[in-house]
Every structure is written in C-alpha cells, then in structure tokens.
Image (cartoon, rainbow, N blue to C red):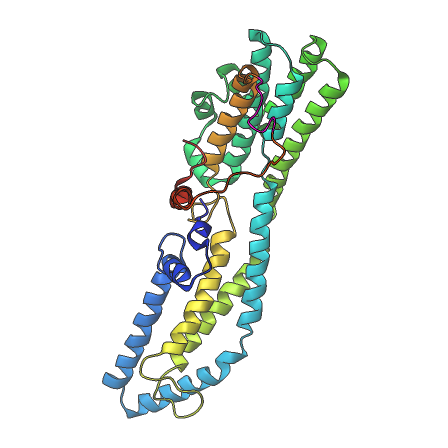
Amino acid sequence: MTVKYTHKIAEATLLGFIKLLFRWKGSMWKLIWKDVLIFGTIYVSISLSYYLAFNDEQKTRFQQIALYCNLNSYKIPLAFVLGFYVSQVVSRFWLYFNSIPWPSTLAYYVNIFITGEDENTRKYRRTVMRYVCCTFTMVMRSICQPVKKRFPTLNHLVEAGLLTEEEETEVKNFEVKCNHYFIPIVWGTSLISTARKQGMIKKDIDQERLIMELNAFRSGCSKLIRFDWVTLPLVYTQVVSVAVYLFSFTCLLGRYPFIKEGNQESYFPFFTLLQFVFYIAWLKVGEAVANPFGEDDDDFDVNILIDCFVQESFIVVDQLKTSIPKLVKDQHWNRQDFSMPQLNEVALVEFLGSAGGIKLVN
C-alpha cells in the first residue's frame, strides 16, 4: 500500500523532513541500495586494479579511455529523457487510481430504490452488491498479482462468498467464449429488472438509475483492463534504462583522480556518486509506479480495497437499512450561535498522536 507520511509533516519544520529522509519503507534507499553497492564496488575495484595491477603502458591506455569517457558522458541527454519518462509514468499512476470504480454510490441507490424488509428483498439487495464486488475481484485477478495470489482460481471466490457453486459453473461455461469478468454485472442488471417487475422498485426512473450506476461501475473496470492491456511503449522504457546504465558505465570508466585533462574527481567520487544516486533513484521511481497493482511499497493494496468494498456494500444495503436512529432535537435546537467549541490543547495532542494509527478496515 502507498506509504503514508503526510501526518508526520503537519508542520513544515526542518526536523520533520529530516526524519522522513531516514525512513526505510517506501524510501529511495530501499530501492537503490543494491545498485549503489554494485556501483561502489566496481569503482573501487577499478581504482585498485589501476594502482596495484596495471603496468605503465596499461595505465596510459586506461587514462586515455577514462578521459574519452569523461569528456563525452555529458553528451547523453539523460535529464531530459528520464524526466519526461518519470512524469509520464507518474501521471499514468494517478490515472490508474482515479479509474478504480467504487461501489459506494451504487450501494446507496440500491438501499434507497429496492425497498422492503422481507427476506426476499434483502436477498436481492445483497446479491446485486455481491455481484458488483465479485466483478471487481475478477477484474483485479487478471491485472493485480497480489489479488491473483489470494484468489488463484474461481473456487477461491466461492470460498470467499463472492460466488456460489452454481454461479461458478456458469462463469466457467462462458470463460472460453467471452470476457467472463462482467458476467456477474449482467446478472445484476437482470436482478434489477426482475425487482422492478415484482414491485420492489417503485418507478422506472429508479430502475434506470440503478442500471446506469451498474454500467458506470463496469466502465471503470473496463478502463482498468485497457490500462493494463496498453502500457507505455516498451521501446521508451528500454531507451531510458539503457541511457541511465550507459551513463553509469561511462562514469565508472571516466571519473578518476588520475585522468590528466577534463573534470577530475577527488579520491572519493562524491559528486559522481550523487549523480548516480539521483539518476538511478529516478529510474527506480519510474519502475516502481509503472505498475501500481504490483507488490512494491507504493503500489495500491487492492486486497484491502476488496475487503472494504464487500464490508461497506453489505452494511449499506442491509444493516443500515434497518438501523436508522430515532429522531431527536439536536443540541443546537434553540441556539442562535452555531459556532463549534474550540479543541483544547490536550485533545489536539491526542488527536495528532493517534492520526497515524487510523486504519481503513479492522
């Protein structure tokens, strides 16, 4: 799941940002430490070989190679290529998130429009929402590795209560014939039509609104499938990767204190290491967010979303239907001044201290 840290910087203080630099989960240190270790090891190995193993002729030849690499490494337009790539990938990352369909609105409409407290009506409401959650889960199984691991087969959906055994058989019958992800949505539209015929839905316009919300949810799922189907061109990812690693290779050959001309490094390649860290971190950011449905620290935890969708859907269409609180006069009934009481300092400290522990689902 995306690492949360904004509550740690509620105040823009230097100390707060310094603390963030030393966090491990979701940090650039976790992404680049292996590359930095390999880069440093190779750099030190070449330096030791030059001083301890090369003869005078080999040293002269290597100095010529190092000078050539050092003078020409800046000709690689790395900042432009990498910056454009990362901006495109991050934009796509947010498009992914904004395309995730949420069943909340549909659940509210089902709660309002499919009326009745008898057992049969409850079955209709709960089954429509179960089909919606099942569709989302089936779509995520095809594009999200953690969900695929959790539900590797349709039988696991049966065990989770999202499908019945009869429904599993029907889905399997159509699995090789068509896009089976949206079969439960089709069943949901049929249920809504039947509910209208049986009088559970009072008006045609209410039925139309429910069908529109079901179709909007299906459209959101379709958009996620299209995003997974058509990715950023592979050639561009290859160009960026080759540019970064080629630049790193030229630095390994060209940034030494013993070259006779051009920009020389000190005995510790501080600025070369900084360049490498920044460029490789950018590349790793692009790789990490290119597929937000993977298993990186900053990927979406879709399994939590599935649990949340199921929990919220059933609560809205079933439990909240019969748990309306009794009407009472509120405490502002006879007041003219509606300003809220100020939060005292003790309560404020307690709130800020517990803000980081808020969870989506118990």
Q: Residue at x 59, y 17 (%)?
A: 125
Q: Is residue 50 left or right of residue 18?
A: left
Where is residue 177 drawn, in percent x and y? 61, 27
Lateral position of residue 44 relative to residue 1, left or right: left
- Quadrant in the picture for residue 171: top right
Q: Quadrant of residue 222?
A: top right
Query: Which quarter of the rendered picture does the C terminus lie within?
Result: top left
- The image position of residue 190, as x and y in percent, is 67, 17
Q: Quadrant of residue 226?
A: top right
Between residues 127 and 164, which one lies in front from this camera angle?
127
Read off the magenta span. 327-334
6 vs 39: above or below: above
The residue at the far left in this view is 52
Nearer the observer, 163 or 51? 163
Q: Is residue 331 shown in magenta?
A: yes
Does residue 272 appear anywhere in the picture? yes
Q: Return the x and y of residue 51 as percentages of the image width and height.
A: 26, 85
What is the residue that sits farthest to the right in this orientation? Answer: 204
Residue 334, compared with residue 268, is above or below; it is: above
Is residue 256 on the magenta stretch? no
Identify whether 97 is placed above or below 239: above
In the rendered image, residue 113, in percent from the top left (x then y), is placed at 67, 18
Q: Which image quarter holds the N terminus? A: top left
